[in-house]
Image (cartoon, helix red, strand yellow):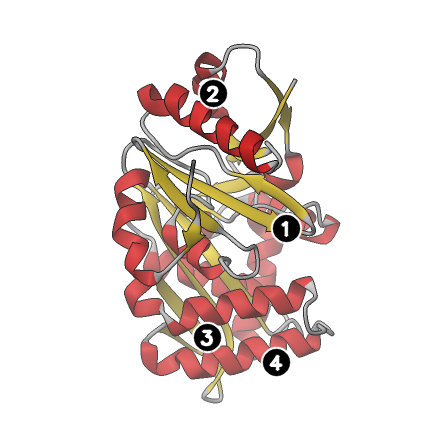
Amino acid sequence: MLQFREIQLDDKETFQSYFQQRRYDNAHFNFTNLFMWRNVCRIRWAEAGEALFLRAEWEGEAFVLPPICRDEAMPAALEELVAFCEETEHPLIIRGIEATLLPVVEAAKPGFFNLTADRDNFDYVYEQTALATLAGRRYHGKKNHLNQFLKNNSGYEYAPLTPELVDACEAFTDRWCAQKGCEKGDSIDCERQAIHDGLQNMERLGFVGGVILLNGQVEAYSFGEKINEDTAVIHVEKANGEIRGLYAAINWEFCRQAWEGVTFINREEDMGEEGLRKAKESYHPVILLEKYVATPK
């Protein structure tokens, strides 16, 4: 039976070896994301045969992710997963199945699963050049917000995120959380904890980031990493919402300064939040990366 254990920093190389076996565009299928959220979402992992297995919890629901493996190893991996869920009475709810994985899952266990689109967790994928230039009429509003920020904050400084700036970013994260009215244990506080875990281990996790400083103080930052040969994922983007145009500025600066060499930018899902959905749609994604939930029929 599968033996699940906690994620440690030393597990990164093992995870990477599995993620490299096929192309994944899902923003959550990378070690940094799983490590950051390991405590908040109680993420645990196991190995068996030729597959990596992940289980998690969110808002009281226990679920698993699709086995991370080569397509030809999926039949055996799903049998292993089904057996584990039956023996332990763990719910057999598989979340985060990319559209490209659907035929692999269906072929592995024909007719076994109900497959349902999970719109709240579709990833928003953009062209890097669009976010880095904001060119054209459809970005007119975004360019106006950016220009307003540039006009009112001519002395701002953009800088790469380095270990020396981690403490300042953590302090800003705490200020951001307080501005949002977070309380211990709520979703915003959980996000704050995940961000702290990421920042404190940035060198070993290997992501890159950028910050905007006003009067020497961090007022916005973002960090992310490449998840495949042509796509970068933005793990975190935070800004002082009281400074007009600052979100537009950190997005623009980070995309043009850090990601010139990639084709696409994945800015993750909207989690069903209306305001977040509207904001992400306003940047005109070229792809809505569909994800599905599988449950037994």
- Local crowd size for mark 4, using a 10 Å CA cut-off: few (<14), some (14–19), many (≥20): some
Say which quadrant the C terminus sits in: top right
Going by the numbered disc 3, the residue's amino acid type is Ile
Single out the mark in the foreground, 3 or 1: 1
Classify 295 as above or below 275: above
Query: Would you call the spot at circle 1 few (<14 residues within 10 Å), some (14-19), or many (20 or more)?
Result: few
Q: Which mark is residue 212?
A: 3
For this rendering, which residue is in front, 26 or 215? 26
The dot on residue 91 is none
Residue 37 in percent (x, y) is at: 51, 58
Q: Which residue is mark 4?
A: 175
Measured from the top left, where is residue 36 in percent x and y? Answer: 46, 61
Residue under the image location 45 percent in, 88 percent down: 216
Give the alpha-carbon distance from disc 3 to disc 1, as whole Å.
32 Å
Give the residue number, with chain letter if any, for mark 2: 105
The reply to whether residue 145 is visible in this rendering is yes
Disc 4 to disc 2, C-alpha distance: 44 Å
Comparing labels 2 and 3, the label whose residue is closer to the camera? 2
**Residue 129 can be seen, yes or no:** no
- Residue 221 lies, with reference to residue 130, above or below; the image says below
**Residue neighbourhood size for the residue with mark 3, other residues' Cα within 10 Å, grouped as few (<14), some (14–19), many (≥20):** many
Which label lies toward us, 4 or 1? 1
Which mark sits nearer the N-terminus, 4 or 3? 4
Of the two numbered discs 3 and 1 on the same chain, state the one appearing first in sequence.
1
Residue 285: give x, y in percent of width and height. 54, 39
Q: Quadrant of residue 61?
A: top right
Which comes before the other along the chain, label 4 or label 1? Answer: 1
- In the displayed structure, 2 sits above or below 113; it is below
Q: Which residue does the numbered mark 1 point to in the structure image?
A: 58
